[in-house]
Image (cartoon, coloured by chain):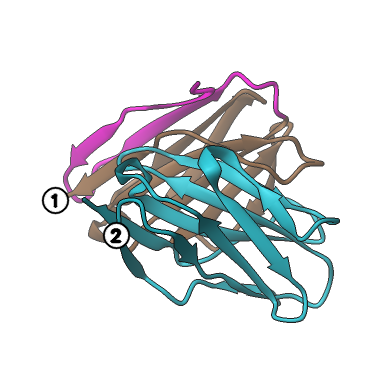
Chain colours: A cyan, B brown
C-alpha cells in the first residue's frame, strides 16, 4: 500500500521569504508525484508533476520541487513567496502512473506581510 | 480558465432531505470523479466513472449514488443526508490513461 505524508499541517512565512513544504511518500514501485494547490473557495489546481528524469521540476508561479528516491521525498520550494501564495498545498502520489491517486493531508500556507 | 463546472456552489439542507449536485466538464476527458473534502481538508475518493461505467466505489454509504448521462457529466445524489455529510464535494476529470486531474470549484454542503 502507498501513502503520502505532509508533516507540517500549517506553515507561516513572511512575504518575500523562501519556502519549503515537505512531502514524504511510501511506495515500492515507480512513483509519479504531483503538487496541487487549493486557493480559498476553489478546487485544486496542478502546480507541477514529476514522472522521471531531472529530479528538480519547475512549476507555475515560480514553484519547483525536488524528487529524492533515497529520501522518499518530494519537497516543494519557492525562492520568494507572495501573499497570494496563501493556500492549501497537497502532495499527491500516483502509483505506477495510474489515476488512483493518494493525497497527502495538505499543508496550509499563510504568508504574512 | 475553469473547465470543470459544479452547481450549486453552496447548499444548506436538513437531515433526511435528498440533494443532488451537478458536474460537467468541457475538456473531452473520458473519466470523472467525485471526492469528499472534510473540514480538515482531507480528500477522499468516492466514485470514478470511465465512459459511463463505474470504476471505483470506495465504500461510501449507500445513500450516495453517482449518475452519469454521458462522459461529460457526472452528478451526485444523496438520498437522505446525515450531519456527517457536511463537507465540500469536489468533482474532477481526466483521461483514463493519464493521472493529471482537473478539479471543479466544489459544492459546499451544510446539513443542519
* Residue B33 seen anywhere in this rendered image of the structure: no
- Taking the view exactly as shown, the residue that stands out farthest to the left is B112
Residue position for label 1: B112
**Dot 1 crowding, Cα within 10 Å, few <14, some 14–19, many 20+:** few
x then y, percent, for residue B104? 47, 33
Secondary structure type for disc 2: loop
Left or right: residue A78 compared with residue A84: right
Disc with the residue nearer the chain's start (2 vs 1): 2
Q: Comparing marks 2 and 1, which lies closer to the viewer? A: 2
Identify the subunit bearing mark 2: B
The chain letter for the residue carrying disc 1 is B
The x and y percentages for residue A97 are 79, 54
Mark 2 and mark 1, same subunit? yes
Residue B90 location (% of width, % of height): 45, 42
The residue closer to the viewer here, A80 or B2, is A80
Structural distance between the alpha carbons of marks 2 and 1: 15 Å
Depth check: A17 or B22 in front? A17
Q: Which mark is residue A87?
A: none
Relative side of A15 to A45, left or right: left
Q: Position of residue A107 (x, y in %)?
A: 41, 63
The residue nearer to you, when weighing A92 against B52, is: A92
| Residue depicted at x 54% and y 63% | B59
Question: Which residue corresponds to the image point at 29% horizontal and 42% vertical from the top-left?
Answer: B108
Query: What residue range appears in magenta?
Result: B1-29
- Reading the image, the residue beneath label 2 is B39
Amino acid at each position: 500500500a502507498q501513502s503520502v505524508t505532509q508533516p507540517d499541517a500549517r506553515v507561516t512565512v513572511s512575504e518575500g521569504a523562501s519556502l519549503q513544504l515537505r512531502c514524504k511518500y511510501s511506495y515500492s514501485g515507480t512513483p509519479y508525484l504531483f503538487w496541487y494547490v487549493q486557493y480559498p473557495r476553489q478546487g485544486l489546481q496542478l502546480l507541477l508533476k514529476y514522472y522521471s528524469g531531472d529530479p528538480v521540476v519547475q512549476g507555475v508561479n515560480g514553484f519547483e520541487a525536488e524528487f529524492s528516491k533515497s529520501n522518499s521525498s518530494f519537497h516543494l520550494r519557492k525562492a520568494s513567496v507572495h501573499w497570494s501564495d496563501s493556500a492549501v498545498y497537497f502532495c499527491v502520489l500516483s502509483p505506477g502512473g495510474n489515476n488512483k491517486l493518494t493525497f497527502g493531508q495538505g499543508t496550509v500556507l499563510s504568508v504574512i506581510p | 480558465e475553469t473547465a470543470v463546472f459544479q452547481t450549486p456552489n453552496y447548499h444548506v439542507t436538513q437531515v433526511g432531505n435528498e440533494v443532488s449536485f451537478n458536474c460537467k466538464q468541457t475538456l473531452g476527458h473520458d473519466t470523472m470523479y467525485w471526492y469528499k473534502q472534510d473540514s480538515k481538508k482531507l480528500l477522499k475518493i468516492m466514485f470514478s466513472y470511465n465512459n459511463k461505467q463505474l470504476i471505483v466505489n470506495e465504500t461510501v454509504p449507500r445513500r450516495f449514488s453517482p449518475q452519469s448521462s454521458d462522459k461529460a457529466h457526472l452528478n451526485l445524489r444523496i438520498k437522505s443526508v446525515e450531519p456527517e455529510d457536511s463537507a465540500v464535494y469536489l468533482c474532477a476529470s481526466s483521461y483514463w490513461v493519464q493521472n493529471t486531474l482537473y478539479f471543479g470549484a466544489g459544492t459546499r454542503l451544510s446539513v443542519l
